[in-house]
Amino acid sequence: MKRHHWLILALLLVALAIRLAYWERSASFGRYELAYDDDEYFKLGVLFARGEFFTDPYPLRYTRAPGLPLFLAPIFAAFGPRIEIALAFQVCVSVLMVALTYACARRAFGKNAALWAMGLMALAPIYASTAGSFVLTETLFSFFTLLFLYLLWRWTDEGMTLWRALLIGLVLGLTALIRPSIIYFLPFAALWFLYKQRVRWKWAIPRLVLLALGAFAIILPYTARNYVVYQRFMLIDSLGGWNVWRDHRTPNDDFWTTLPTIENPSDRDRYAMQRGVQNILADPVYQIGVQGAANLVATMRLELDAFARGGGYLSDAMVDAPTLPLVLWNDLFYLFIVVVGIAGILLAWDRGNALRRTPLLWWLVFFLLLTILQHTQSRFRTQYAFVLIIYAGAALAQGRALWENLAPAARAIWIGASALLLVLAYSPLLPPLFASEFYLAQAQGRDVRAAQQAVAAFPDYARARDALGDAYRRAQDFPNALAAYDAALFRNPYELQARLGRLDIFRQQGDANAVAQEIQAMTLANAELEMPAPLWWEFDPAPTRLVELGDNESSFGYALNFFAIQADGDEKMRFTRDKSFVKFPGVTGWQPKSLVFYARAVPLPNQPLPTVNVRLNGREVANIPLTAEWMDHEIPLDDVARSQDTLVVEFRSPTFRPSDALPGAKDTRELGFMLSYVELR
């Protein structure tokens, strides 16, 4: 192999390693909780895998585009509905995106530029984290968008046969099923194609028609499905109108109260679109001009702001439970590709025909126009950042020669513009955030004085208030701990760590009413634990010997990845999932001799009773056959299990779906076994 090929292979391996690091950190081993968008895509994929194509998991929220679930369905059918499998698929797609970036950059700017662009894409945190951290459409949509642009570009240059036009249309239709917004790019793509073929536009028009027919041939079967289900026309999903009205509301709009009352998703989408358009027409200067400019400016905002203001877990920073280094790396990379990517665009412009050579810039212009119309979150950067990365690769390939050829005035302009960009994107929260994190590293959640210094350095930092509350709580100074947690909740009412801290205090005080009120304040339906797993993992509740899964007071903070509390006759219990966890802090304080769990299996027709695999702190220790009756199962604890202060007990077991396995059952959950309590003795 040539040196060039070895470099390509090395960059692909680097890309895979980085994405697997995000995957392992955020989503593997059953410690990942679905919420909102990713929950809906995942559940729709599960339904499709079961052949239930005429059911939506949450129609009263939205009907989601089916592209990502359609890709997940065969994977779920083969390997089961496992979150880590879905994210592993996204990791593979993201690595293919790295290779596709190389192909596009090489076609535009040559081999050296292609290697630079490929290296940037391999390292890009905005692509690695979206692939490994969340079940969202961004990874798949970005790949197919770039594939569509590449095929359109290449075959336009090489000769657009009718079959090629049809194939490009099919790719466009599939991409639209992933995110329908790309349909609005079709006129831009057609204009570019016609401009390239302006000498023989009569030859070009039939190919454009065939391209459009191919796209709608993919889309319309799902449109027909929507009509069968809802008796209304709905092209793909019900998010378009929701987005338009949400982003163009007036101060007194009844957006949040009216839409949930409209049961049919198509009616809801149409009504929302009408209200949004009415608001735009009533005040276009503000709704498009003022808000559009604000949206463009917001695309450059640092994720550090969201992190410092308590966005924290599952915030705009695209990684599950972000840390300060990850957020900074995400910010600095984005600023770099913006500055260098603009340099590459200007370089291509100087050479002439920048808009005619490739549709990449047309996509960037389209997305900027879309941003003017609609507010975009930072995770949507993946949908256009690949253009900046490709042009940044072109600029880096020129490197020193490009800089040396610049006139002194041009250098001054570049330096000034880059400095201005940094100032505009710079967060005033950066210095106090660094100072507070410095003291938090010293506090380790236990040193009251260091936690007080962290609060003093950044009084509005909810994470510092949480740490101070934790330090007081561990010192049994409950009044000051509650005051610190209340201060964190005042700054961010959704600060779950503060809620967990308050709950733990009330549990230690034996105040059952306060515990119940705190659980209600956490808005956890049916007492089912729904919070980011890393938060649960890091939280350190009071030491306990007994976790009763049928009791909120005993199980909150100690149990993860279980279903809600249920009754089995006189026994209160929770069903496990394929992997469920129970945590015991304070083990070194009393040196227990054995672990006991009280459980039973559900007998299934023509199937043997399951065996549960038990792991302690990740180490397999036993395989226990379950019985159909409630029974204690005891496992001796060795010195290794008692050597760490916190003991994590993991239960792995086969799952079943009652609706498939039991006559007359309608429960479609994937259930493991029944678990009543786990105790150290």
Image (spheres, rainbow, N blue to C red):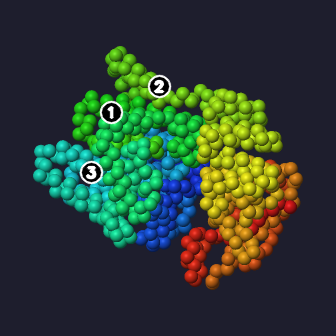
Instruction: Say whether disc 1 or disc 2 marks the residue closer to the N-terminus.
Output: 1
Report the side of 233 relative to 72 (left or right). left
Amino acid type, callout 3: Leu
**Would you name the residue on which mark 2 appears?**
423
**Would you name the residue on which mark 3 appears?**
186
Amino acid type, callout 1: Ile
The alpha-carbon separation of the residues under discs 1 and 3 comes to 23 Å
Name the residue located 69 percent from the left edge and 49 percent from the top edge: 500
* Residue 416 in the image, given as x and y percentages of width and height: 41, 20
In the foreground, 575 or 253? 253
Q: Quadrant of the C terminus?
A: bottom right
Dot 1 surroundings within 10 Å: few (below 14), some, or many (20 or more)? many
Report the side of 317 relative to 71 (left or right). right
**Would you name the residue on which mark 1 appears?**
345
Please say if 553 is above or below 314. Answer: below
Please say if 445 is above or below 90. Answer: above
The alpha-carbon separation of the residues under discs 2 and 3 comes to 37 Å
* Residue 38 in the image, given as x and y percentages of width and height: 50, 56
In the foreground, 137 or 530? 530
